Each structure stands twice: as structure tokens, then as C-alpha cells.
Image: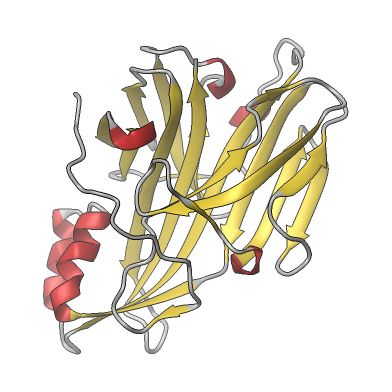
Amino acid sequence: MKCTTACLLQSLFLLAPGIGDGLLQADEVWLTPERFGVTPGATMAFSMTSGVAFRAGTIAVSPREAERVVARLGNEMLATVVSGEKTSPFSITVPRPGFVVLSLELKGQTIDLPFDRVEARLRAIRASAALREGWAEATGSGRWRETEVKRATAFVRVGEPEAGDRGWAVPLRRGLEVVPERDPTVMRAGEELPVRVLSAGLPVADFALAFVSWEEKYEHVVVTDEAGRASAPLEIAGRWLLRGTRLIRSNTAGRDWESETTALVVEVR
């Protein structure tokens, strides 16, 4: 199914620790490797990118917003950066063939919205009917009070990995994530990409996952099955973003909702 996005990129917002004026955060946050394929021994850079949509004209996320940035090659940690240690773009050297897993976790954000902005938020996260019913039953304050954590992942192929190397299939087990079920570094236009959505290593069912092409020419929204699986064709070459948001009721005083957003970028040849 081809889906043309009608919305225009009219403005870009930097991520902020709190949003008290009702403005929504940038819809998308993803990791941008300098290259998706490198040779052993190469030094490569990657940066954190944000935009209202998955297209050109985006902005770099301030390193101050990063809680944790990790680059892993097999069981070897190439870099672990916590908040304030380093500026973006980040740089790593890859010593041997394999798959580099890049992961980002941003600091928790707060979203406080007046009643008339809630519908836009529900549409943005593709809220289910059950979630909308929960909101309707909990409108006591007339405001939307949410804490949000955003995570992003990307994979880089280094040389020719050994047969049987499935470094891209190992869950990070740090909250919500999209884990490929086939090598995402060798995707060709028109091929289907199967994935699993996991939270702390466990499958997430009934989760709306969007497969979005660069410039949003194509979009598929697939709901995961009981095993957390979803699959969609990637029709054209270029970058694709897989993203979704999980929202649950909060038990924290002063907060009504807690959300996690996950994003995976792959390059299709």
C-alpha cells in the first residue's frame, strides 16, 4: 500500500527538557551513520537527527539531550557515551568484520498538553481504540501529562562478516526496540523486512509500527502479532525509518501517561 503524506514540513523544534507551551516534540528522532557499510579499520561518524518528518531539512539533536549512546560490534563495546561526555557527531573505529549496532537513548522528556491538543498527540502515536477509551475515562484534569523516552537504533556492515554472524538480531534489552529478523544491511528495493518489537526482551503485541521511506513517499503501518512480529515491503532504494510509540498509564504522581518511542533506520539498495 502506497501512502502519500500530505503534511508539510513547516517548522522544526529542538528537543527540550519540558514542553510547557503545548508544542509537540519533533515527531522523529533517528541515528544517522556516515555510511551503512565500511571496511575493517575504518573510522566512521554518526549523529543524532531530529525532524517533524523523515525527510531533508532536519536538525541535529543536541548531545545534551542524550542519556546514553552505545556502539557495539559483537560482544565488544566500541563506545559507551553518557550525557555530557562528548559532542555530536560521534566517531568510532571498527577493528574487524561484523555488524556495528548503534543505539541512542534520549533523556526523559515531559509533555504537558491542554485538552485541545490531545487529539493531535493521539494521532501522532497512532493510538488504539483501547487507549482512546482510557483517555476518555481519565480526563479529570483536562490536560495531558506524559513522560516520554525516545530510543533509536541503526546497523552498519563492516567488511564481510563471518557466516552465521547475526549481530543485528541480538536484542539490546533496554526498553522498547525493533529487532530485524533478516540482515538489514543487504536489503534490496522491493524486498520485505520482517522484524520483532520487543520490550526488555519480551514481545510487544498489538503495536502499531510504521515503515516509512525517505521523504515519506511510501508508508506502511503494521500491527504486531502475539509474538511481536511485523513485516512490510520496502519498495524503493534509500533510507527507511521503522518507528512506533508505546503508551501506558502511569503510576507516578503528577503524570498520567508514560511512553516509549523506538526508531530503526535501514538503507535499501
On screen, 185 above or below 58? Answer: above
Where residue 204 appears, x then y in whole percent?
A: 39, 45
Q: Is residue 225 left or right of residue 58?
A: left
Residue found 78% across the figure and 53% down from its top: 80
Does the image show residue 225?
Answer: no
Where residue 261 appears, x then y in whole percent?
A: 43, 55
On screen, 61 above or below 239? Answer: below
Does the image show residue 193?
Answer: yes
The residue lying toward the viewer, choosing from 257 and 25, is 25
The residue lying toward the viewer, choosing from 178 and 95, is 95
Where residue 89 appears, x then y in whole percent?
A: 69, 50
Q: Quadrant of residue 119?
A: bottom left
On screen, 178 above or below 7? Answer: above
Residue found 48% across the figure and 74% down from its top: 16
Looking at the picture, the colour scheme in use is secondary structure
Quarter the N terminus occupies? top left
Residue found 12% across the figure and 66% down from its top: 133
